Image (cartoon, coloured by chain):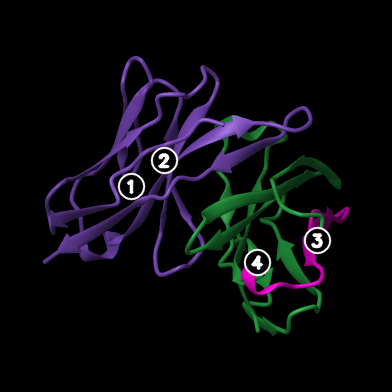
Chain colours: A green, B purple
Amino acid sequence: KAGVTQTPRYLIKTRGQQVTLSCSPISGHRSVSWYQQTPGQGLQFLFEYFSETQRNKGNFPGRFSGRQFSNSRSEMNVSTLELGDSALYLCASSWMADGMNTEAFFGQGTRLTVV
Amino acid sequence: DAKTTQPPSMDCAEGRAANLPCNHSTISGNEYVYWYRQIHSQGPQYIIHGLKNNETNEMASLIITEDRKSSTLILPHATLRDTAVYYCIVRVRGGTQGAQKLVFGQGTRLTINP
């Protein structure tokens, strides 16, 4: 069974540009969550999607957005990039709708560098 | 959100048991404790989780105190490949029905020494 796949693995963008990151969950998983990891703030929750609906959102500005498609694949978008957006962006998938008692599996992440 | 507190770093000799503590004194009754580890900024790897009973799997054991305010992850026979940052996490509800998220702390950097 293939794991969570994130593309691209590495990305370099210029301030002010926008970027789209992609996440393909494990087959059969319908919940997809996104996290940002930086040296200063650690791992922080961005948002969670289930059946194409955003169910939860973290404390990030509106420049950060996402969506989920009918095949459960998800994308996140960051507009008007700032230097502080440089981070490892991680996607995690779970198979249950109510996942309190279900492990989440993470992808390898996309390393975004803003210059 | 429930928060976790872990020591920033620990050392353990290869072949010995590694015991990683975690405090989560504000955890709510229906919130689970999860443990993940992360090696070289790869994606976090799931280890184990529990609610109030002790749990064991092929990787580790999880001991949760009766009041649920703290827990300990035990790696029974640590190897050099267990060197990683270990996160004790509380899975909390939020947003619309069914929504939940993992709330990460700063983790413990565990170094296994030969």
Residue B61 appears left or right of B37: left
Does residue B20 lie above or below A8 as drawn? Answer: above
Marks 4/1 in contact by CB < 8 Å: the verdict is no
- Picture residue at 15% right of the left edge, 54% below the top: B12
Q: Earlier in the sequence, mark 2 or mark 1?
A: 2
Compared with B23, A115 (above or below) is: below
Mark 3–mark 2 distance (CA, rounded to whole Å): 34 Å
- For residue A69, side relative to residue A43 (left or right): right
Q: Can you identify the residue that label 3 sits on?
A: A63
**Image-quadrant location for residue B93:** top right
Can you tell which mark lies on residue A39? none
Q: Is residue B71 magenta?
A: no
The residue nearer to you, when weighing B58 against A5, is A5
Residue type of the residue flagged with mark 3: Arg
Look at the image and give the residue range highlighted in magenta: A63-84
Q: Which label belongs to residue A5?
A: 4
Can you tell which of label 1 and label 3 is closer to the viewer? 3
Residue A19 appears left or right of B111: right
The answer to whether tags 1 and 3 share a subunit is: no
Q: Position of residue A26 (x, y in %)?
A: 66, 56
Q: Quadrant of the C terminus of chain A?
A: bottom right
Check residue A79 for magenta coloring: yes
Q: Quadrant of residue A101?
A: top right
Q: Quadrant of the N terminus of chain A?
A: bottom right
Return the residue at label 1.
B59
Number of disc labels: 4
Q: SS at mark 3?
A: loop
The subunit carrying tag 4 is A
**Residue A30 in view (yes/no):** no
